[in-house]
């Protein structure tokens, strides 16, 4: 079990396991929401997430849609301002801000994304793959096709 909490400890949660991806997003909105050069997020299946306390402390900000849905959504603790997970119950998976995990998720970052939008004052010095908007879109489309094929194969015939 992996536990996590906000800065003040008011929002507490646990996840059974992190499945990834573990991405470092350099888009402007992630930089603004994290207050850093990038947002580090880990993919988690919604069914593996359990909120232990603090639902009443979770606030959500939906930023205006820039190009196309879905909107950028930032969830945070009303008391301390920490980013916190707040999954959509209708979604199969969601992203957890890695910095709020109290335990090792047993995953490591696997890529930088939206590097064409990174802060000009930040230099990426590691060897992780660096995907710009076009490469990320292609990756997501290929993953969606694979996922769709997997679902169709698991359907009874």
Image: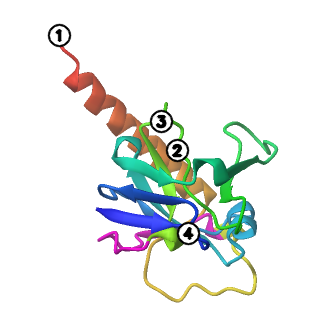
Which residue is labeled 4 in the image?
9
Which residue is labeled 1 in the image?
157
Q: Give the overall secondary structure of the magenta segment.
A: loop
Which residue is labeled 3 in the image?
91
Give the number of the disc on residue 87.
2
* Front tag of 2 and 1: 2
Label 2 to label 1, Cα distance in Å? 32 Å
In terms of secondary structure, where does tag 2 sit?
loop
Q: What are the residue bounds of the magenta stretch?
A: 102-115
Label 3 to label 1, Cα distance in Å? 25 Å
Contact between marks 4 and 2 (CB within 8 A): the answer is no
Task: Find residue 47 and report its image quarter.
Answer: top left
* Front tag of 1 and 4: 4
Q: Residue at x 21, y 25 (%)?
A: 153
Contact between marks 3 and 1 (CB within 8 A): the answer is no
* Front tag of 3 and 1: 3
Using the image as rendered, state which of residue 18 and residue 148 is in the foreground.
18
Mark earlier in primary sequence (3, 4): 4
Label 1 to label 4, Cα distance in Å? 49 Å
Does the rendering let one see residue 6? yes
Q: In this view, does 19 lie to the left or right of 100?
A: left
In terms of secondary structure, where does tag 4 sit?
loop
């Amino acid at each position: 079990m992996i536990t996590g909490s906000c800065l003040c400890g008011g929002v507490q949660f646990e996840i059974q396991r992190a499945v990834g991806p573990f991405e470092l997003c350099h888009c402007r909105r992630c930089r603004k929401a994290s207050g850093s050069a990038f947002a580090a997020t880990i993919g988690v299946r919604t069914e593996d997430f359990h909120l232990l306390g603090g639902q009443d402390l979770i606030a959500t900000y939906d930023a205006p849609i820039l190009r196309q849905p879905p909107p950028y959504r930032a969830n945070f603790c009303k008391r301390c301002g920490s980013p916190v997970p707040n999954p959509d119950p209708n979604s199969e998976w969601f992203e957890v801000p890695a910095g709020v995990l109290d335990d090792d998720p047993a995953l490591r970052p696997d890529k930088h994304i939206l590097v064409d939008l990174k802060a000009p004052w930040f230099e990426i010095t590691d060897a992780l793959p660096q995907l710009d908007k076009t490469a990320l879109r292609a990756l997501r489309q290929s993953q969606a096709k694979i996922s769709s094929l997997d679902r169709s194969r698991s359907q009874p015939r």
